[in-house]
Amino acid sequence: MLKVYGLYRSRATRPLWLLGELGVPFAHVPVTQAYKLADPLAADAPLNTLSPAFRALSPAGAIPVIEDAGFVLAESLAITLYLAKKHGGPLAPADPQEEALMLQWALYGTTAIEEPALEISFAYARGEAETEAGRARIAAAEGKLLRPLAVLEAHLATTGQIVGDRFTVADLNMAEIVRYAQPDTALMARFPGVTRWLEAAQARPAFQAMWAARTAEPA
Ligand SMILES: N[C@@H](CCC(=O)N[C@@H](CS)C(=O)NCC(=O)O)C(=O)O
């Protein structure tokens, strides 16, 4: 059976959400991030990103990773694109052009949006939005996001989706990247089309199921 390595409280949300959309059964192996543990190499440490058994699968030491009948794949966005293409259906690319566009938007999301959006996510999670230094960090991240979110806003004004006129793995990938900026309601309010599209993606039953499992996981 397909195995997904990585806690729900990580970028493993991406394949975990997608597998819910596809209805594909899988075994979940809850590998945790080493930085969350006092001594990740201790004999009694839970399986983590520094555990030798996990490093044998993932030399980069990062989650998520999947193992599909002996095929091992890392990088969350490569995993979702692989799984969507393998299992087909409306979430998958319909032709090589759609596949290329899905790759284009995945790369744009990860290079132009993910890092500053994560800055915002961490700042809010750590309660730094209340401090002057935190507000300065958030403002700097907002500055980096204005242009790519405007690109996304203009793009979504065409069909309302990232690729084609239906919900696909490209929407799922981008939604999981933009989610990191969501706590910044003032920023999101400047992009009503992006906000509507993100909320529609997050209203899907498979997202809701993934989110419930994530919320149930210890922080
Ligand atoms: N670009 C990679 C990033 C993977 C990544 O950095 N994962 C984090 C958790 S979300 C991780 O495993 N960090 C390892 C650690 O902190 O020990 C992907 O999208 O899969």
Image: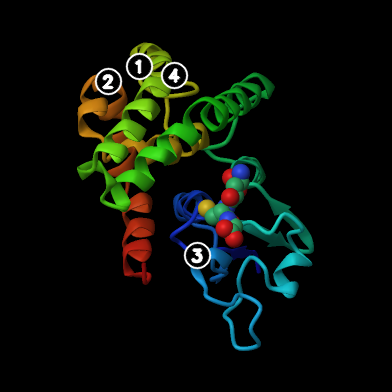
Image-based side of 193 in relation to 64, left or right: left
Q: Is mark 1 within 8 Å of ligand 1?
A: no
Instruction: Of the two numbered discs 2 and 3 on the same chain, state the one appearing first in sequence.
Output: 3
Q: Quadrant of the N terminus?
A: bottom right
- Residue 202 rendering spot, x and y as whole percentages: 31, 43
- Residue 137 rendering spot, x and y as whole percentages: 36, 34
Secondary element under disc 4, as helix, strand or loop, is helix
Closest to the observer, 184 or 155: 184
Look at the numbered discs 1 and 2 and tell me whether their residues touch, using CB distance below 8 Å.
Answer: yes
Any part of residue 76 in sight:
no
- Residue 190 rendering spot, x and y as whole percentages: 24, 19
Could you tell me the amino acid type at mark 3?
Leu
Distance from the alpha carbon under mark 4 to that under mark 3: 29 Å
**Residue at the spot of label 3:** 7
**Residue at the spot of label 1:** 153
**Residue at the spot of label 4:** 148
Could you tell me the amino acid type at mark 4?
Pro
The residue furthest front is: 132
Residue 106 is marked as none
Closest to the observer, 9 or 158: 9
Query: What is the quadrant of residue 177 in the picture?
Result: top left
Residue 164, above or below 68: above
Instruction: Of the two numbered discs 4 and 3 on the same chain, state the one appearing first in sequence.
Output: 3
Residue shown at the point (31%, 52%) measured from the top left: 125
